[in-house]
Image (tube, grey):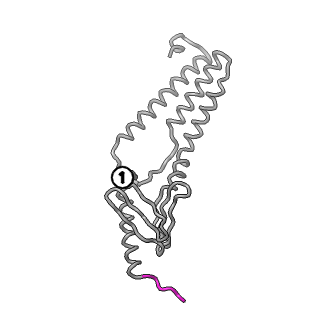
Amino acid sequence: MRTLGEGAHGLALALAILEVVTSVTLGVSVLLAVRKARRPAKASAPVHPHHGPDWIDVFIGVVLLVEVLERYHQTHHIARPTILMGVGLIVFGLLHGRIAARTGKGMTLRLEDEVLYVGGKPFRALRVKWPELASIDIGPRYATITARDGRHRKLDLADLEGADAVRGALENARQRLAELSSNPPVENG
């Protein structure tokens, strides 16, 4: 704004306008994100919404790169750390959806025909075939899935996004386990 007020011409004017435009764009994207976060979630919304680019990170990276251009124009100094940070923010912002999807895959509950799978931290996922499943206990806050060999996973339902859907899926799994326990599969011998 100072540069615009001084009556700059040429490249200095273009950089000043570019700075104002990128800063305003960043401000608008932050306001839109805050507005979206304050909106109540729709009951029909998916438990794991589609993640796309994180535009705030992208615009922060662009603002940093424009600052680098302005600094170079004024001092002929290349701010390498700022360039690295700006490019990094743009890359991570654009890859945000893929990163979120990859991390979300580990935190899943799948009730398949042959197995029950509860994702988690590396080496902590529980994958149990239905006949090897000992119990599914569902309390007001926690649900515990236990295999016959003693392996188990405790889920904090209060900490889960879509806890009602997870609770319903676990109730269905518990009913299926009860049906399997009362009618064990016949093995061909």
Q: Main secondary structure of the magenta part?
A: loop
Name, please, the residue furthest toward the top. Answer: 6
Instruction: Farthest residue to the bottom: give it.
Output: 189
Instruction: From the viewer's side, name the closer residue of 178 and 76.
Output: 178
Q: Nearer the viewer, residue 128 or 93?
A: 128
Q: Nearer the viewer, residue 173 or 7?
A: 173
For this orientation, the residue located farthest to the left is 140
Q: Which residue is mark 1?
A: 158
Q: Does 167 appear above or below 30?
A: below
At 48% across and 55% down in the image, what residue appears? 107
Q: Residues within 10 Å of mark 1 (few under 14, many from 20)?
A: few
x, y percent for residue 124? 52, 58
Position above or below: 175 against 186? above
- Answer whether residue 1 is magenta in the image: no
Placement of 134 over or under 64, stated as above or below: below
Q: Residue at x 64, y 28 (%)?
A: 81
Residue under the image location 65 percent in, 15 percent down: 75
Q: Position of residue 80 (x, y in %)?
A: 66, 27
Relative to residue 18, is residue 145 drawn left or right?
A: left
Q: Position of residue 50 (x, y in %)?
A: 47, 50
Read off the magenta span: 184-189
In percent of width and height, residue 87 lies at 61, 34
